[in-house]
Image: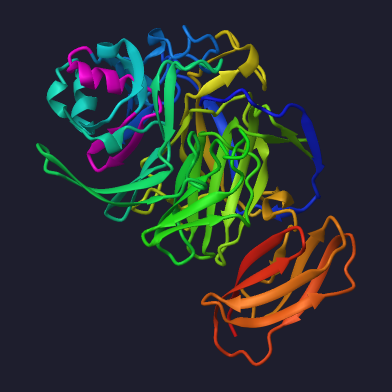
Amino acid sequence: MTKKLFFLFGFILISLSAFTQTAPFQIQIEPMSIDGLGGLQAYAFAQHEGKWLIVGGRLDGLHRRQPFAAFDVAGNNNQLIVVDPVTLQKWYAPLSSLPVAMQEQLSSTNMQFHQEGNYLYVIGGYGYHTATASRKTFDNLTAIHVPAVIDAVMNGNSFSSFFRQISHPQFAVTGGHLKKIYDTYYLLAGNKFDGNYNPMGNPTYTQVYTNAIRKFNLSDDGINITVTHLPGISDEQNLHRRDYNAVAQIMPDGGQGITAFSGVFQHEVDLPFLNCVNIDSSGYEVNNAFQQFYNHYHCAVLPLYSASNNEMHTVFFGGIAQFYDSAGVLVQDNNVPFVKTIARVTRDLAGTMSEYKLPVEMPGFLGAGAEFITAPSVPSYPNEVVKLDHLAADTTLVGYIFGGISSTAANIFFTNTGSQSSASSQLFKVLLIRSTTVGEDELNEQSLGSLRMQVFPNPSDGDFEVKFHLNKVTETKFKLHSLDGNVIAEELLTDLRLGENTYHYAIKNMQRRGTYLLTLETAFEKAFRKIIIQP
């Protein structure tokens, strides 16, 4: 969660239109606590039969500015933690019985991790390296047999035989994500940070972004781990991001995918990305038509998919962001503060993504470095996206939020001495409400781009309206073409005005159904929307 110092100071206020949408569901969070459970942030986890196994992370809050105090060894979590959120019990066991190389990695922060069946695979992480008396990004992959370790920790038995570790330079990543699409693992973005953190600009470390999606297959017979590295994807401009949210998705074609939301830092300025990157088994696509404003750093995230509506919903809980809403005004704070916002990003069946602010907030500056842990009874797809249509009850416990950073104020980075934040021990139940009176969520029209282009209805029979916003009356070109590039229609729009505009279009002599790309372009900007024609 490292920030650089070269921020643009000040605030920018942007008025928000009062455009709301009947919410597809409502989110409610209820605080709960377990006596004696300590605070933790930026950890890895897995679960078995309703119990959680928690590994690594930090016992303190936001890393301090003083180089001698940042990522202090005393803040390492050097214990395995087992939690039962139903019986409100917890168990601890020290890592000291494991080999040093395992202890060091498994007490690090910002590891990449994924649970596959009984095994939790953790990769990389940033922590203290005894041999060099310094901090580094570890190049290990460690496999943990989750049921056996949970049982051993609960009963005070030995667990060292349930851990295995291999090493490879490709695994030296921190601040990225490890996800899976079908049978292939994706090690997404992040960076290799070696040396002691120093925000003062002194050369006490080296930092190299991976700028890549690394892919591999993994075979594990319980004894031997075999990794086959596959050709990856490199993109220095768009994959230069870390400390972001990579979330499993069901894409509009029904296939599995991943969306990388926001993250830091942009090449041109030390601020978060507002766009996202959509990844599937065939490649990736940068979505510049969508802009995310509310949740930029890693936080607790809940993915849900409605097959009946072909809608993918991703709910973000608090964290850190460049923007927040204040009484209907979108405030831009380039210090990138802690926020309370709970927001939803929805992708429709045409692939259009929109951001909505929910009418509920985190009860404090919480969420950064926290994790959402799905309740075991919740029906999910193989990639752990929740099946929204299967949640028939009026109210469903969909999961929990645990830990993260608790900050005493929005902006503490430049004054942080260690007392302004802490690792949270707070637990929340997350409830999803499906009643017919679920209220409304506020659309952040800025998320649609500065043109704020919307198409209604979509899908359509070829007769639709395009609504868009002009900050300056200028020549505007409308273009409709097929996905293979054939132009269907192209017009120069006239009689436009400052602010909101509506253009009606009816496709003539087109019988075939399909997906098309609609473009609006001015001298200053361009917006794209996929539309679906169903004659």
Q: Does residue 454 appear left or right of residue 115 in this picture? A: right
Look at the image and tell me in which quarter the C terminus lies.
bottom right
**The magenta stretch spans residue 37:** no
Vertical side of 505 occupied by 380: above or below: above
Q: Residue furthest bottom?
A: 509
Q: Residue furthest front?
A: 203
Viewer-proximal residue, 501 or 393? 501
The structure's colour scheme is rainbow
> Residue 129: x, y in percent?
30, 15
- Residue shown at 26% from the left, 48% from the top: 216
Vertical side of 102 occupied by 382: above or below: below
**The magenta stretch spans residue 105:** yes
Viewer-proximal residue, 285 or 59? 285
Vertical side of 247 occupied by 40: above or below: above
* Magenta highlight range: 96-124
Q: Does residue 338 appear left or right of residue 216 in this picture? A: right
Q: How many marks?
A: 0
Viewer-proximal residue, 339 or 85? 339
The image quarter in which residue 339 lies: top right
> Residue 113: x, y in percent?
33, 36
> Residue 13: x, y in percent?
81, 37
The image quarter in which residue 412 lies: top right
Q: Is residue 483 visible?
A: yes
> Residue 326: x, y in percent?
77, 34
Vertical side of 360 occupied by 180: above or below: below
Q: Is residue 49 visible?
A: no
